[in-house]
Image (cartoon, rainbow, N blue to C red):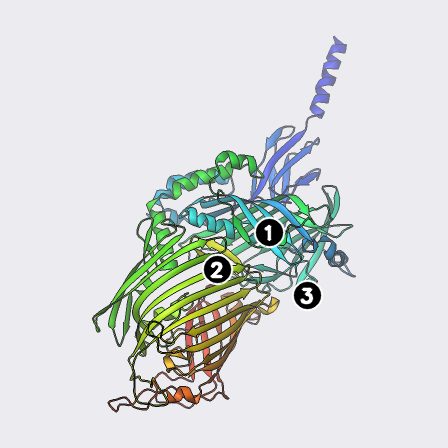
Amino acid sequence: MKSLSYLFFLLISNHLFAQHTVIKGKISDATTGEAIPFANVFFMQSHFGTTTDFDGFFTLTSNTPDDSVSIVVLGYKSRNKEVKKGTAQTLNVQLDPEGFETKTIVVTPGENPAFRILRGVWANKEKNDKRNLDSYQYESYSKVEVDADNINKKFTGSSVFAPFKNIFDSLKLAAGEDGKPILPFYISETLSDYYFLKVPERKKEVIKGNRSQGVGVGNQSSGFVAQIMGSSFQDYNFYQNYINLLEKNFISPIATGGRDFYKYYLVDSLVIDGKYCYKIDFKPKRKQDLAFTGSIWITDTTFALRRIVVEVGTDANLNYVERIKIQQELEQTSSGHWIPAKVRILLDIKELNKNAFGLLAKFYVSNKNFMVNKPKELTFYEERVVTEAESQNHDTAYWNANRHEKLTAQDKVVYSMIDSVKDLPTVRTYVDLIQVISSGYVGMGKYVDFGNLYYCVGYNNVEGARVRAGLKTTYAFSKYWMLEAYTAYGFKDNQFKYNFEVARFLSRKTWTKVGVQYKKDVEGFGLQDDFFGSRGLLNAVAQLGLINRLNRFEQSRVWMETDLTRGLTQRVFFLSKHIEPLGINFGFYPNPEKKDKIEKSFSISEITLETRFAYKDIFILAGNKRLRLTEERFPIFMFQYTYGIKGLFGSDFEYHKASINVSQLMKLGAFGRGEYSVTARKVFATLPYPLLDIQLGNETPLRGYDAFNLMRFFEFIGDQSLTASYTQHFDGLFFNRVPVLRKAKLREVVGAKTAWVGLTEANKRIIPPFDNNGKPILQPPNSNPNIPYVEVFYGVENLFNFIRIDAIHRLTYIDPPNDKFYQRFAIKASLYFAF
């Protein structure tokens, strides 16, 4: 019995001492619900620990009788949690964000040991940077979620929030013990193949699958979102010296000049998947610089970037942004170069006021099946983004089989919540209001929109008060046919005006479409020929009685547009137009040599060829329209040639016109952004001045983007001109060094505009001094082609986050004429929306 008792005691003791404490769980952000990767989780007594993976999960096992664990990670408040000894258990912990703390870092004399590692990174960039591969491709899965956060008690107690109450109570449970509830209203999944070719540089993404669910999301907007939020637009390469983030240039922590902007701290070394790595923490030397806070993990032999976590806080000069966070885990390819295998991005938009809520945009990208240095034929890369026809029609089985990771329980809750939220009347009202403000059109059912509201009311000295109403078809009506029409009425001239347009796609792949238009209306001198809508705002403002030199016209137009190849767009249009100038005493000699007759109206028929070339142009499709995203590194060229055909449909003139424009938006690193435009025009004919080159002046109180803002309407007219403009946006480079201005997040802007305009004697002589009744005829203005018109401006952008104020000086032609609109100096405002 004693032997049996001893044996039993021995077995029990061995079992007790052999018991493990096993803890599994997930570490996440308490404010966003996002996983926190690479966090340190360890037992407080034994200090035995592990780190969370990219998705925030960890497993911690110990034989020692520890009863508490600690969670520590840069950028978050550390937490200690009690655990049960000797049992397997689940521990999910939410951490609150905090600033970068350096109080535990000890600086020793001599060279910073992090610098040696950084020199290794710089020396090995060519071997590690994926851009040096001849080609690469991979399959990419991306997931996007947008939520409302920072939902305060005042808002939850309001009548607006009442329909959400039951949903919000469920979200509190889903957020966890210490998490803050967020209200999801959009989620999207995209599966695509991504391709890169080095020479010539080409990128391509083929979207194989997309499903989106959310407030105000239909098939058209779903496809648009899939393109702008696909993996290729979340591709941040930290081997580049500057990272373009929200149209701002942030310096990379491994940039060759990074030591001028960052403080570095070598804090740890560890083994990641069998590779020994150094961990370096960093923060900006100056809070106002566009730089990151975070950590990098560098391999010890190849000095490759293995992991990176960067964050941007409220100190950066960004609008609306509370926080940006980017996390990457890179994988080595067969060639030795590294490509991000997993990416997580968080964009936290702050609430606009204390009674509103903020927004969270969360992006997750998983890449796999890497293939390098096996390029395809060059023609394969012609289209930048391709969406397969069946991409939005896949069922649940397809997604279960093809998504890289299973949906988490939280993802399933999000899908369920969005189903409930999107159908609430309150939500629909807000969505409809936003769409009206952004487009100017109100939906009238599925197939037709009413508008444009910004043109519904106007006034001028010919029509008096004017009203206008129009309709246009939607993408749901047809993805091939587009119809648009409006009618207007002037209460002074008692005449109706109208416009009708029909366009049809022949090929969406090459964006080939044809169209016809018939229009009868009035327009301002110098504001005509805006068929493709580049001057919409100025035209709308000009309706408010600020232009008194008008044309009454009737025109027919036939046009065609196509992409000849990537970046090369060709337009051809034929125009027949009858023009009757109003508001001025106008006349011209049909035969300037005989001067035997004076006419007051005229007709033209012309054909125009317009060619636009922008290297590496990118287009994002949005139904029957597309958004152009142009590569900043290259200029855009625009050439236009017009031939006037005399006698065709009663045309009075034969002429040739030509123009060429070069423009570019440049990213200048720490110096912000620069943009320039240079245009040369020439008219090869003798024509009345309404058909010549009328420079776009601006007598409105608003700043015009492409107008000369102190030039009067109709002040400079010529048959040859050279214009140029340059604008420098410093994005807070100087204001950031002044505490008061830095807090207001103001930004500096300076620039200049100039125009050389010449008018030949022949085009002066075609205008008689008096009409048939002896009344003086308005003559074209005189200008000296050797003296350019020049105006300079300087100002402040980002006032109240959406206003730009310019102080503008006119430097030439400053002798004040007898004109109430003449100004040598003015302050003008415009809307400014930017991060």
How many other residues sit within 10 Å of disc 2, few (<14), some (14-19) or many (≥20)? many
> Considering the numbered disc 1 on the image, is that residue within a helix, a strand or a loop?
helix
Taking the image as drawn, is residue 562 in sight?
A: yes
Residue carrying label 3: 260
> Considering the numbered disc 2 on the image, is that residue within a helix, a strand or a loop?
strand
Taking the image as drawn, is residue 36 in sight?
A: no
The amino acid type, in three-letter code, at marker 3 is Asp
Residue carrying label 1: 380
In this picture, residue 491 sits left or right of residue 70:
left
Instruction: Kindly identify the residue that appears in the image at 62 percent across and 64 percent down.
Output: 286
How many other residues sit within 10 Å of disc 3, few (<14), some (14-19) or many (≥20)? few
Residue 562: assigned label: 2
How many other residues sit within 10 Å of disc 1, few (<14), some (14-19) or many (≥20)? few
Foreground: 76 or 595?
595
Instruction: Kindly identify the residue that appears in the image at 22 percent across and 70 percent down.
Output: 495
Distance between mark 2 and mark 3 Cα atoms: 48 Å
Residue 538 location, x and y as percent? 38, 71
Residue 722 location, x and y as percent? 50, 80
The amino acid type, in three-letter code, at marker 1 is Phe
